[in-house]
């Protein structure tokens, strides 16, 4: 299970350091759970010079390599700053900053070439869901960014399903809605790659995930953790979600050993 916090454009640098210290001084992580925090980009180099209890993530990366690209930062630069994971394809970037499918696919390539892990986001709008094209929409996003990847990089791919209508709205996908989309993504991975890869790629749920609904969402067979926005801004709340992932992992282990 992976619980990842996407802070978006929130927190001062001092608040970020306080959070990192607070999270790191909490009890050890539950078995089978890893944490990731993606703070704003200006904080990455400083945070990346200290080992924390969490993996350090970036919220964005350039689709280009080094050169005359004012304001951009490359995947290699992130790697050199101690970043482990990079979020790519978030709907807020797709909608507001011109990250179309081609740009997103290029960013995925750059992250993987730099040896980092990518957290690839996909998800449908409310209109897509109401028009019953949500599976098509999500699987087309998978196709454009993930289909061409060779098997050997797939152990550095994480998929995050984030229905746009659930992001920051307080509306959460029901466990059944999350499970059916995650199962469709898993099925797509099975067809595009194979059973082993499909089973190994973590598929996170994102969209108003919080301590009060994390247990139910994480109990779903194909939900392997969460990408958390608002509830990742509070270290205690975030840790509660991490502990929910720990309970889900323990239940899975118990179910497997009973079978
Ligand atoms: P919220 O948890 O605030 O809905 O945000 C989800 C998200 O966009 C994480 O990337």
Image (cartoon, grey):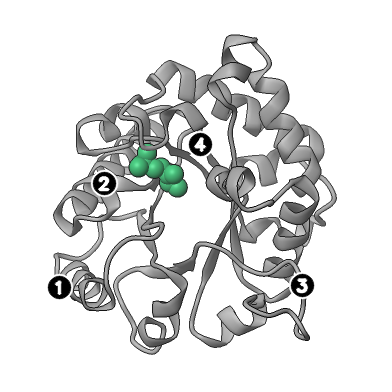
Q: Which residue is mark 3?
A: 64
* Disc 3 CB within 8 Å of nearest ligand 1 atom: no
Instruction: Compare residues 199 and 174 and report the one nearer the observer.
Output: 174
Q: Residue at x 69, y 51 (%)?
A: 98
Q: Which residue is mark 2?
A: 231
Closer to the eye: label 4 or 1: 4
Q: How many circles with numbers are drawn on the protein?
A: 4
For marks 4 and 2, the one nearer the N-term is 4
Closer to the eye: label 4 or 3: 3
Instruction: Compare residues 55 and 72 and report the one nearer the observer.
Output: 72
Q: Residue at x 35, y 30 (%)?
A: 169
Assess disc 2: are there few (<14), some (14-19) or many (≥20) residues with their C-alpha within 10 Å of its C-alpha. Answer: many
* Disc 2 CB within 8 Å of nearest ligand 1 atom: yes
For marks 4 and 3, the one nearer the N-term is 3
Q: CB of mark 1 within 8 Å of CB of mark 3? A: no
Give the secondary structure at mark 2: helix
Instruction: Compare residues 211 and 40 and report the one nearer the observer.
Output: 40
Q: Which residue is mark 4?
A: 162
In x, y percent, where is residue 183? 58, 26
Q: Is residue 204 left or right of residue 71?
A: left
How far is the residue under mark 2 from the one under mark 1? 19 Å
Q: Quadrant of ligand 1?
A: top left
Against 158, residue 214 (above or below) is above
Give the secondary structure at mark 1: loop
Give the secondary structure at mark 4: loop
Q: Which residue is mark 1?
A: 25
Closer to the eye: label 2 or 3: 3
How far is the residue under mark 4 from the one under mark 1? 30 Å
Q: Residue at x 41, y 83 (%)?
A: 48
For marks 2 and 3, the one nearer the N-term is 3
Assess disc 1: are there few (<14), some (14-19) or many (≥20) residues with their C-alpha within 10 Å of its C-alpha. Answer: few
């Amino acid at each position: 299970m992976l619980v990842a916090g996407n802070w978006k454009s929130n927190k001062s640098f001092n608040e970020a350091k306080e959070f990192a210290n607070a999270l790191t001084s909490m009890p050890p992580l539950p078995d089978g759970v890893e944490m990731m925090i993606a703070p704003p980009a200006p904080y990455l180099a400083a945070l990346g010079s200290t080992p924390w209890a969490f993996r350090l993530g970036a919220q964005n990366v350039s689709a280009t390599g080094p050169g005359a690209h004012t304001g951009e930062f490359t995947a290699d630069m992130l790697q050199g700053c101690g970043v482990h994971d990079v979020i790519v394809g978030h709907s807020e970037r797709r909608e507001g900053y011109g990250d179309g499918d081609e740009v997103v696919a290029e960013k995925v390539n750059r992250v993987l070439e730099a040896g980092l892990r990518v957290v690839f986001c996909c998800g449908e709008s409310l209109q897509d869901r109401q028009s019953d094209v949500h599976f098509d929409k999500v699987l087309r996003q998978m196709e454009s960014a993930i289909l061409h990847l060779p098997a050997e990089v797939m152990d550095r791919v994480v998929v995050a399903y984030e229905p746009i209508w659930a992001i920051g709205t307080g509306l959460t996908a029901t466990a059944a809605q999350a499970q059916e989309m995650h199962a469709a993504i898993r099925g797509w991975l099975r067809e595009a790659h194979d059973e082993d890869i499909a089973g190994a790629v973590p598929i996170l749920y994102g969209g108003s995930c919080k301590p009060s609904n994390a247990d139910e969402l994480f109990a779903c067979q194909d939900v392997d953790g969460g990408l958390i926005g608002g509830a990742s801004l509070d270290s205690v709340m975030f840790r509660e979600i991490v502990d929910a992932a720990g309970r889900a992992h323990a239940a899975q282990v118990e179910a497997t050993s009973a079978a």
